[in-house]
Amino acid sequence: MNKDFFLSVQTRLKDKVSELKYIDENWGQLDFYGEKAPVKYPAALIDIGSINWINKSQKQQLGVGELIVTLYDMKLTRTSNAAPSAQKEAAFSIYSTLRKIHLALHGWVAENTTGSLVRVSNKRAVRDDGINEYATVFKFQMIDDFVTLFEITDPAPEFIIEDMP
């Protein structure tokens, strides 16, 4: 995994989802800072959940990974049936932003070493601070042939792999 992948995703979200006021790598901005979180809402934080690698050759590996884009928004208005329509529309805007993230990334190829991103799940987290949190997980495949830039003197271990999950 390299910085170019993160930068590509960050740029894509900036260009395609204008509602987002903060887009960054997820390093715990909303986990460790309480009310003083260093973000503006709505915010999208990007992370890699995991990448499982298999050897394709001595100098090349294929990875299947998860890109996690978590959308955060501060809920400041009511959504009950008694709330004015304009208030409800503003409060539910997180759902249209979530949809735009999906449309911006699903099927998109982040860089020349990855396959297209495929959305596989959405999950809401319940928080006690009034922030709405929705994580969208995208699967992708990636070829890593970085090692071809170096001379290898020891052979790669031989693995027999039947199926990838």
Image (cartoon, rainbow, N blue to C red):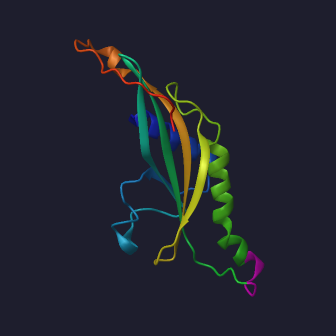
- Magenta span: predominant SS is loop
Q: Where residue 158 sits in the image (x, y, percent)? A: 34, 20
Q: Where residue 27 sits in the image (x, y, percent)? A: 36, 54
In the image, is 102 to the left or to the right of 7? right
Residue positioned 39% across, 34% down in the render: 2
Up-down: is 44 above or below 91? above
Up-down: is 80 above or below 55? below
* Residue at the limit of the structure toward the bottom, as seen here: 82
Quarter of the view holding residue 161: top left
Which quadrant is home to the N terminus?
Answer: top left
Q: Is residue 50 magenta?
A: no
Q: Where residue 100 sits in the image (x, y, percent)? A: 66, 51
Residue positioned 51% across, 39% down in the render: 165
The residue lying toward the viewer, choosing from 108 and 8, is 108
* Residue at the limit of the structure toward the left, as seen here: 153
Residue positioned 43% across, 33% down in the render: 4
In the image, is 103 to the left or to the right of 52? right
In the image, is 33 to the left or to the right of 43? left
In the image, is 150 to the left or to the right of 72? left
Residue positioned 43% across, 39% down in the render: 51
Quarter of the view holding residue 89: bottom right
Up-down: is 16 above or below 125? above
What is the tally of numbered marks visible in this picture? 0
Up-down: is 23 above or below 111? below
Q: Where residue 79 sits in the image (x, y, percent)? A: 68, 79
Q: Does the magenta stretch include residue 83?
A: yes
* Magenta range: 81-86
